[in-house]
Amino acid sequence: MRENNCRITAGNEHEAPNPPGWLITFNDLITLLMVFFVLLFAMGNINVQKSEKFVESLQGALGVLREGKKVGVQIVRPIQPKEPATHEVSGDASNKVSQPSETSLKAIDDLTNHPEITVIQTPKGLFITLSDGILFQSGISELRPEGYPVLNKIIHVLQSNGLDIRIEGHTDNVAIRSGRFPSNWDLSIARAVSVVKYFIDAGKISPQRLSAVGYGDSKSLYPNDSPENRGKNRRVEIILEMMDS
C-alpha cells in the first residue's frame, strides 16, 4: 500500500503576513509630526480675542480645584514696540527709585574725590569700592572710628532711594594669622556684616534692603603678586542694585 505524501498545512495558506513592528512605529511618528505642524500653523495665526473667550470658558468649566486654587490660564499677547522711555515713575517703582537729593549728590561728589574710593555707575547699579584701610585695621573686623565720616556720606546716598544694598568683603591671598578668624573668608564676611550693622544702627537703613557677602580672595581685581596689588584687592564694595544680578 502506497503512503500518502500529501502535506497538511494548518491555517489559511492565503492569509497575509503581519507587518513588521517598525512600520507601526513609523506610522505613529508621521502622525505626530503632522499634528505638530498643524499646531504650529494654528499658533502662528492665533486670534487673541477668540483665545481670550476660550480661556474664560475654560476657566468657568474648570472652576475651583480641590486644593482651593483656580486654574490659571493666560494668553500671551504679541510684543508691541516699546514707547519712548520717560522719566516718570509711578506705583511701587516710586518707592524704589527717586530723584537724588542735593545732599546725596554732594555725598557722591565727595566720595568720588577721595583717593581710596571708587564710584562707578553701571546699568546694574551704583558700585562704591572702599580700600579696607579706610574702615579696618589689618586682620580686624571692627570698624575704625576714622571710617565713620565716609560711611555717613554713603548713608546719605542710601537714604535717597529704596534700592537693595549688597555689602561685599574682599581680601588678598595672604593667609591670616588670627585665632578669631580661621581664614580670609571668615574675615571678609565679618567685615561686610560690620558695615551692615553700622548702616542699620547709624543710618536707620531697613534691614530688608541689606545683605552681606564675603568672598575672601576669590574675586581679586589684580594678581596678588605685589604689596600694591594686594592692597587693591583688600576692599569693601557697597552695591546699590538697580536690577537682579
Image: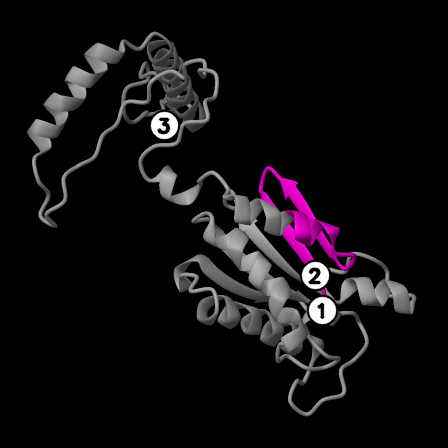
Q: CA distance from mark 2 to mark 3?
A: 112 Å
Taking the magenta stretch, the answer to whether it contains residue 130 is yes
- Left or right: 129 as drawn, with respect to 210: right
Q: CA distance from mark 1 to mark 3?
A: 117 Å
Colour setting = one colour
Comes first in the chain, label 2 or label 3: 3
Q: Where, by quadrant of the figure, is residue 76 drawn?
A: top left
Give percent across and percent down for residue 22.
Answer: 45, 26
Which disc number belongs to residue 3? Answer: 3
Residue tagged by mark 1?
Answer: 134
Tell me which amino acid carries mark 2. Leu
Give percent across and percent down for residue 235.
Answer: 71, 64
Residue tagged by mark 2?
Answer: 130
Residue range highlighted in magenta: 109-131
Secondary structure beneath disc 3?
loop
Residue 245 visible from this viewpoint: no
